[in-house]
Amino acid sequence: MKLSALVGVVAGAVGVLPSLALALPQEVSEAETAQQEQVMETITVVAHRQPRQLSEVAGTVSIISEEDLQRNVVLNASDMVRYQPGVELDDTTSRFGHSGFRIRGIGGNRTAVVIDQIPVADYFAVGTYSNTGRGLLELGLASRVEILRGPASTLYGSKALGGVVAVNLLDAQDVLTSANHGSRIQFGMNSDSNRAKVMAATAFADNDTSFMVAAAVQYGQDMQSEGLASDKRDHQHRRQQAALLRAAADSELGEWRVTLDLQRESRNTDINSVIGSGRLAATTSLIGDDSRDQYRIVADLDMAPTAWIDRGQWRVYQQHSVIEQDSYEQRMLLPEPLDIQRLFDFSQETSGIGADLETDLRLAKLRHRLGYGFEISSSVLEDQRDALQTNLTTGVSTNVLLGETFPLRDFPRSRVTELGVYVHDEFQLWPDGPVISPGLRYEHYRLRTRDDALFELRYPNTEVTDLTHDAWLPKLGIVWPLAGNTEWFAQYARGYRAPPFSDVNIGLYYPQFNVLAIANPDLKAERGYAFETGVRGRSAESEWSLTAYHNRYSDFIQSRASLGFDPVRGLLVFQSINRDKVVIEGLEATFSQQLSDSWSTAVSAEYSRGEDRQSGRAIADVAPPRAIAEVQYSADTWDSRLVLTAVRGQRELVDEGGAKLFSAPGYATLDWLTRWYVNTDTDISVGVFNLTDRQYWRNSRVSGIAENDPQLAVLAESGLSVGAAIYYTF
């Protein structure tokens, strides 16, 4: 049975549940009512930008609490999503780090990542030697993470085409152990990449004020890929540092808070995997020296109720990130050996202001929760590449490589301004009846190029363009309570991603090869249309859910696509263009059960597929089916659990030219995690991962890579590894 038909069957099945619920008696027994009241629900913020119980959300949200971060020995972003169905880390290099999260097959800049409601800096990559990565060092100071699956542009605007990952950083209230003071220290390690982490935080409070300072440092090396000899590894040493300072004070308007967030990351990589292959056949040494610096200043207000606003948050922020990447290459196998230095700089400075407000009111005898807000941001983006090639025989140096004259830019200096205004409502049609939640957002996107003498010098024949886009982004959800703490939900949501600065105006001209890239003033925004439905339920001993989704995406942007030979220019012309429809659909299921006072179990499974409707090709970024099952035993002072992860082999993949891509084989891994509650102040968590020492690849690390790519060996996951963490509060 095709997946689309299966989705239809599930949608139809859950669609008739509300009608069945109407036939149930309207009065519930006292015993049933008491049982329902005993169920404690998790609160989420990401789905409505205001607190809601998970049972009130017309969609799929995962909550990763501080407890989950500790019990799973989470030291970085990859650890965090290890057991999350439908979510992966976008990471396809051994040098630069990850580019964000991939949700249901959509990642990169198409999935929004927000830190305390502030969007993180954009991801940008060009060529082999320039890749900004995404950083996300704040995860070392996170207290909670929420993941919203599927298009969420109605509330989060552009870049939320695939979904949202919302990270909440530590606050003073998370650290305080008494009314006035509290501290915590965490030590962690994992042998998979010889990484170690230290985190410390302390907080003070006095009447209506509080202050917190926290810092995290992590050291690591390259992944100890199973089956890879040491001389073939891309040896790496990385150091990541993050600091967080927060001050808060209560007032008649609410709680004011000021945050300073500082980050620094450095990576030194000795690359061996690609040396001696392709255009690096004569290369004998390739060294990468990369750094990332970022700061964020945020002032926000958590409002006290007023006559017109029952709850709300205001924020104003400035964020600045700078990436510097240096590559040093030697080609000693040439008749005249060469020394090549490449430099890449990228900076983004963003200022913004926003608010998320909510008012309770009654209209037409119905209770409404009316949410509304806005977000305005302005970003200045700039990159520069430089290079110098020295002939070691003659001593002659040149700044011309492969026909490119350095320094140069890949796009003109640009300013991107975004404005979003949204309104979102919730109302129940009758007591214990369905809750309807319509929403609408107006999004305005403006790209303006700035005077750039360097870009004009290097690309005198390239026309640049300014771009303005407007969009209306609706959504409609329904949650229908059924009997016994069960509800049916469904939603339709529109996704949107404005044309990126680097695709609208492209700097590319190789006179040596008669190659030219041109701007595209008619580039359309990418759009998504998400349909999702499911049922979920909970009791004092169990929770379960079944979800089906069908997401259609149109006008996907293909960067630097070949337009063929232009006889007028006498050049091979490239341009970023829109591609036709992509469809991603799937099923997700979760189940957890408390079997007894000591034993519990949990199972999650996902099945998805993606297809380019124009070519019929399978989408490489869509992960193969996966199931995760665990069983846990809990005692008074410790608990232990086994986690089995089983993944089916990726279907056969090809690129646009029909060449075969690497299809990750299926695998099964077994992890053993134990936690010891030493006393009320100290916990110790230990994990033994990949107990069977299996060689395997995560799809998100190898998607889109050719089947004979020399990097494949270094992109394999670690064999058997041990992780441990100690958490101490005082």
Image (spheres, rainbow, N blue to C red):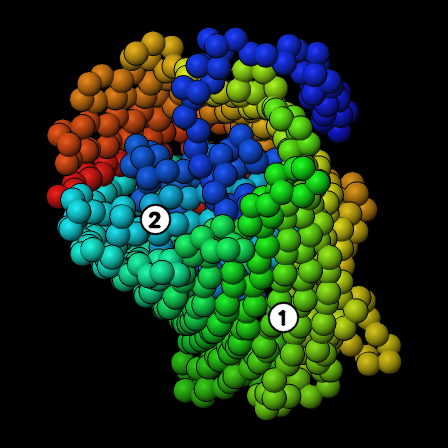
Which of the two residues, 538 or 708, is positioned nearer the viewer here? Answer: 538
Which of the two residues, 150 or 51, is positioned nearer the viewer here? Answer: 51
Identify residue for label 2.
142
Tell me which amino acid carries mark 1.
Phe
Whole-percent x, y for residue 537 in the image: 53, 21
Up-down: is 691 above or below 300? above
**In the image, 574: left or right of 644?**
right
Q: CA distance from mark 2 to mark 1?
A: 31 Å
Residue in view at x 67 percent, y 48 percent: 439
Is residue 215 visible to the viewer in this orientation of the structure? no
Q: Secondary structure at mark 2?
A: strand
Identify residue for label 1.
501
Q: Secondary structure at mark 1?
A: helix
**In the image, 242: left or right of 460?**
left
Whole-percent x, y for residue 437 in the image: 65, 40
Which numbered mark, 2 or 1, is in the foreground of this view? 2
**In the image, 494: left or right of 373?**
right
Whole-percent x, y for residue 576 in the image: 72, 65
Residue in view at x 62 percent, y 26 percent: 431
Which of the two residues, 271 or 282, is positioned nearer the viewer here? Answer: 271
- How many residues crowd mark 2 within 10 Å: few (<14), some (14–19), many (20+)? some
Q: Quadrant of residue 59?
A: top right
Which of the two residues, 146 or 373, is positioned nearer the viewer here? Answer: 373
